[in-house]
């Protein structure tokens, strides 16, 4: 030891006992492992958040695509009345390009006398004071056009919590929409757990555009449509949706056994509002099914059931009848102009959803067929390579042998190719030689 070196344990670096070193290293190892686990959990959470964001974006794109094909004006405002989402129908009504509509206060398109009422409605909906607002307004388009319209709104999210208010609105200018301003009937008391509370037109149409993104099959989708229609058509009690001819429907969705029985009686009688609506493409209404002279057979059968009034609205795709929305009530003369108009709006939205579902299913089948074709092509190419190696032939000759054997044995070329690739080349070559 040098004369300048400190004695053990007395210098600037005191000697640390070995057991403390071991304990410290163990603590560091545990801390490192805890940090690694925490990082893995954080990564898993980030991946889950990414999946949720992707799903949310996909649903929003899906909803935007569906609302774009609806001829009814749909838009969303924030709690201050500024437009944050809109479909092309609204832009067309207001005479402004869709991108320029977003971010503008909706009041700039209203007649001055309608502005105070709209602002009050926005405040009350955003605060949760009222459940629905419906009123007649005059809209002033940027192209100078003026139109009388019906504006209906509900709160998608109120501003009472941390989430900003989002208000859904429907703007329609059809003269028949004046019926929507009729006083709404008082809802019947709901039993505990009952999911039949009335909802607004805007909420129902928005909900319809979200249905297909849930991934339900066609029957479940129609059942949910029936439930939404029952909740939004003012005088409805039971609803069904049939796709295809009512005489031989492809799919049926109902909200109750009463609707199922009413559909069944019409099929049994081979006559009724549902069949006429599908055949004519027009709305059919009956105020008293038991005495309606248009369907004498059905009238006799209807005595055994609770249905008295029927509202049948055709669901059309591309102008051609595709199905029928059937609304039933146990009251005589239950359905007025407002019921009819709301049912027509629901049928429009349902048709758009079904059209998009059909297109998605078609694209899914096409994708599956393409994937199968590509996979089969890869197997065939591998089989050709095996035959070329075994027989010393070129690619064209190997292909010709597979085709010839396929025709002789009535076996698909891809199935023969799979046998070759899976190790049965000798059997295939021997069969081709005979």
Image: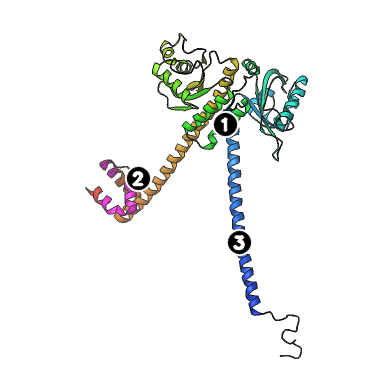
In front of the other: label 3 or label 2? 3
Assign a secondary structure to mark 1: loop
- Percent x, y of residue 241: 49, 25
Q: Which residue is mark 2?
A: 414
Q: Nearer the viewer, mark 3 or mark 1?
A: 1
Secondary structure beneath disc 2? helix
Spatial distance from mark 2 to mark 1, Cα to Cα? 59 Å
Residue at 52% from the left image edge and 12% from the top image edge? 287
Among the 4 quarters of the image, the one containing residue 88: top right
Name the residue located 56 percent from the left edge and 32 percent from the top edge: 193
Seen from the viewer's position, the closer of residues 41 and 367 is 41
In the picture, measured across the screen, residue 197 lies left or right of residue 308, that is right
C-alpha distance separating marks 3 and 1: 49 Å
Residue 35 horizontal/vertical position (percent)? 63, 62
Badge 3 marks a residue whose secondary structure is: helix
* Residue stretch rendered in magenta on the structure: 404-429
From this view, report whether residue 386 is shown above or below residue 105.
below
307 or 292, nearer to the observer:
307
């Amino acid at each position: 030891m040098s004369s300048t070196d400190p004695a053990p344990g007395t210098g600037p670096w005191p000697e640390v006992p070995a057991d403390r070193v071991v304990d410290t290293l163990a603590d560091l190892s545990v801390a490192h492992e805890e940090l690694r686990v925490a990082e893995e959990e954080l990564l898993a959470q980030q991946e889950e958040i990414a999946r949720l964001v992707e799903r949310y974006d996909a649903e929003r794109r899906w909803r935007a695509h569906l609302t774009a094909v609806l001829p009814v004006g749909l838009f969303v405002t924030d709690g201050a009345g500024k437009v944050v989402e809109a479909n092309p129908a609204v832009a067309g009504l207001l005479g402004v390009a869709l991108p320029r509509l977003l971010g503008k206060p909706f009041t700039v398109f209203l007649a001055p006398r309608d502005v105070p009422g709209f602002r009050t409605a926005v405040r009350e909906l955003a605060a949760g004071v009222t459940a629905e607002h419906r009123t007649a307004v005059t809209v002033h388009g940027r192209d100078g056009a003026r139109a009388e319209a019906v504006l209906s709104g509900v709160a998608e999210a109120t501003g009472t919590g941390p989430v900003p208010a989002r208000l859904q609105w429907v703007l329609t200018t059809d003269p028949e929409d004046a019926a929507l301003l009729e006083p709404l009937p008082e809802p019947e008391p709901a039993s505990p757990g009952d999911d039949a509370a009335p909802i607004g037109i805007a909420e129902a149409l928005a909900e319809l555009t979200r249905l297909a993104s849930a991934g339900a099959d066609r029957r479940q989708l129609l059942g949910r449509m029936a439930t939404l229609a029952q909740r939004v058509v003012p005088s409805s009690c039971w609803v069904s949706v049939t796709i295809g001819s009512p005489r031989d429907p492809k799919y049926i969705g109902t909200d109750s056994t009463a609707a199922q029985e009413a559909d069944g009686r019409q099929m049994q009688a081979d006559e009724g509002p549902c069949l006429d609506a599908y055949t004519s493409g027009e709305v059919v209404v009956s105020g008293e099914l038991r005495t309606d002279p248009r369907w004498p057979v059905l009238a006799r059968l209807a005595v055994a059931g609770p249905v008295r009034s029927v509202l049948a609205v055709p669901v059309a795709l591309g102008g051609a009848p595709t199905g029928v929305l059937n609304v039933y009530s146990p009251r005589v003369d239950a359905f007025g102009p407002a019921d009819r108009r709301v049912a027509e709006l629901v049928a429009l939205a349902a048709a758009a959803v079904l059209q998009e579902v059909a297109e998605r299913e078609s694209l899914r089948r096409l994708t599956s067929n393409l994937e199968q074709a590509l996979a089969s092509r890869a197997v065939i190419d591998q089989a050709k390579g095996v035959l070329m190696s075994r027989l010393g032939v070129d690619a064209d000759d190997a292909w010709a042998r597979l085709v010839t054997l396929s025709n002789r044995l009535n076996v698909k070329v891809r199935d023969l190719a799979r046998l070759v690739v899976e190790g049965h080349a000798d059997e295939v070559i021997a069969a081709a030689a005979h």
